[in-house]
């Protein structure tokens, strides 16, 4: 019988391959995105210092209060604007986008486009 890998294992392998190609620095940190079935999470990480500089997610009260649902494209685009505003307040203008092994469409694309529109460069 042929065993087939689950979708989450395939995503983790893709993420490991992507992470071998780029890393976040103090000048250009990494915008890491994770999406679960119910929520989305975005972090801006300095991999050299191993510190999370800015984070936002749909589980936070101030973000969740603005959303009707936390797992749709509208929530993802709102999260993109929130993470971009917090990054600009922290003095971060340029980032490297880490899609976390997810396909660049739908929620991931909406988050990236909203972050670009709000002022982040990547």
Image (tube, rainbow, N blue to C red):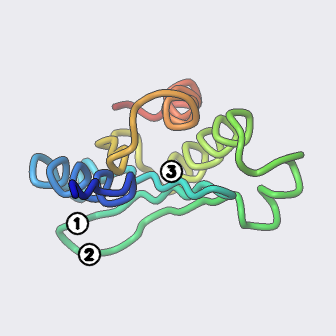
Residue under the point 41% across and 48% down: 92
Q: Tag 1 or tag 3, which sits nearer the N-term?
A: 1
Q: Are marks 2 and 1 in contact (CB under 8 Å)?
A: yes
Q: Nearer the viewer, residue 17 or 91?
A: 17
Q: Nearer the viewer, residue 10 or 117?
A: 10
Describe the element under mark 1 as helix, strand or loop: loop
Label 2: few (<14), some or many (≥20) within 10 Å?
A: few
Describe the element under mark 2 as helix, strand or loop: loop
Mark number displayed over residue 47: 1
Which residue bears the numbered disc 3? 87
Would residue 63 be found to the left or right of residue 121 on screen?
Answer: right
Which residue bears the numbered disc 2? 50
User: Quick check: 77 above or below 52?
Assistant: above
| C-alpha separation, residue under disc 3 versus residue under disc 1 | 16 Å
Q: Looking at the picture, how far across and down is residue 59, in whole percent?
A: 72, 66
Q: Which residue in the rendered view is the most extreme toward the front?
A: 1
Q: Nearer the viewer, residue 4 or 113?
A: 4
Describe the element under mark 3 as helix, strand or loop: helix
Q: Looking at the picture, how far across and down is residue 84, in whole percent?
A: 55, 43
């Amino acid at each position: 019988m042929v065993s087939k890998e689950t979708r989450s294992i395939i995503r983790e392998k893709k993420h490991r391959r992507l992470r071998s190609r780029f890393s976040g620095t103090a000048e250009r940190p990494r915008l890491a995105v994770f999406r679960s079935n119910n929520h989305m999470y975005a972090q801006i990480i300095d991999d050299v210092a191993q510190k999370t500089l800015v984070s936002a997610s749909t589980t936070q009260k101030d973000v969740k209060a603005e959303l009707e649902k936390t797992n749709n494209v509208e929530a993802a685009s709102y999260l993109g604007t929130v993470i971009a505003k917090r990054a600009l307040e922290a003095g971060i203008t340029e980032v490297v986008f880490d899609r976390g092994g997810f396909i660049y469409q739908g929620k991931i694309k909406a988050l990236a486009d909203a972050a670009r529109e709000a002022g982040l460069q990547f």
